[in-house]
Image: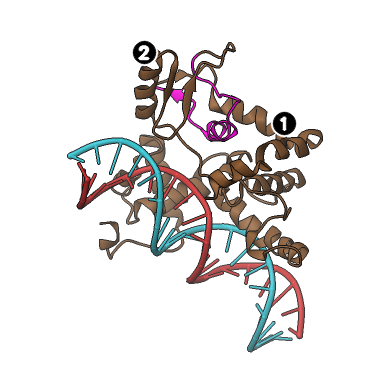
Chain colours: A brown, B cyan, C red
Amino acid sequence: MEGSSLRVRKGAWTEEEDLLLKKCIEKYGEGKWHQVPARAGLNRCRKSCRLRWLNYLKPNIKRGHFAADEVDLIIRLHNLLGNRWSLIAGRLPGRTANDVKNYWNTHLLKKNIDTFSKTSNPKSHQLKPNTKVIKPRPQILSKRSFLVNLDEYNNNNNRAETSNNVVLADCGDNHGGYCFPHHDEMMWWENMMMNEKEVDGHQLNCSANDIDQSVLDQIMNEDNYGNTMDELFLDEELWNVFNP
DNA sequence: AAATTATACAACCGCCGCATT
DNA sequence: CAATGCGGCGGTTGTATAATT
């Protein structure tokens, strides 16, 4: 058990600890966090190491004030996704989920409550009170699941379904066997959220990232914003699926 | 100048889904 | 099938610093 170690250090990290963690990641790479404390010679738990690396030590982390366009994007994405900070941060190069969350809580949340306290539940944290936020968590296809289902797909008339209801289907375009059906908005959304784009080093023909970026670009476009939101979120049936 | 309050953000905690045994 | 361990996430807290009284 992780909490059984009473001697594990907590609190602010020292420069020495940062250096040890940095050297460890440089030597062994990111990941296998349970091994990091021993490898680095740190008296910290794996979670503390991971968090310190991801939120502070990792290269290319952008610090300082959020630019106006970043703030705008945060507001839009939060309106779209709710408190899915890691997803939102994924669209802000150099920003961590913790940064985005902190910024929201300190800079935007209060403003938000002030603005909409009369028209909506302040706890909803939404800038547009009438806009429905997508609730389901992203469905990430594990490498194992993908391979199992890819095999099924190849042997079953070009169609297979994973345990997460992520459909592998031939949608008739030139993207190959792994694509995102348009007939089912829920499936479409789930697939859009997928962030795994490589399987055993092979880039998928139609990666989730490609879809994700193009769709988000469209959503972020002011001209298409309303229509896209309507199509996506104002379908009561779809909403009820997510909110039984 | 000292005390108090507000703000910003780093870090912790508990929970979850998934994989493995 | 259950137990366990892991990575990851969002909510929350702790604390240093800034602003105000």
Mark 1 = which residue? A218
**A178 in the magenta segment:** yes
Which quarter shows the N terminus of chain A?
bottom left
**Could you tell me residue A236's position as x and y percent?**
64, 44
Q: Which mark is residue A120?
A: none
Dot 2, how many residues are within 10 Å of its Cα: few (below 14), some (14-19), or many (20+)?
A: few
Is A16 or B5 nearer to us in this picture? B5
Q: Secondary structure at mark 1?
A: helix
* Magenta stretch bounds: A177-199
Q: Which residue is mark 2?
A: A155
Chain of the residue where label 1 is placed in the rendered structure: A
Amino acid on which the number 2 mark rests in the picture: Asn
From the viewer's perspective, tell me whether residue A66 is left or right of residue B9: right
Q: Is residue C17 left or right of residue A137?
A: right
Give the answer, above or below, for where A210 lies relative to A44. above
Mark 1 residue type: Gln
- Can residue A189 be seen here? The reply is yes
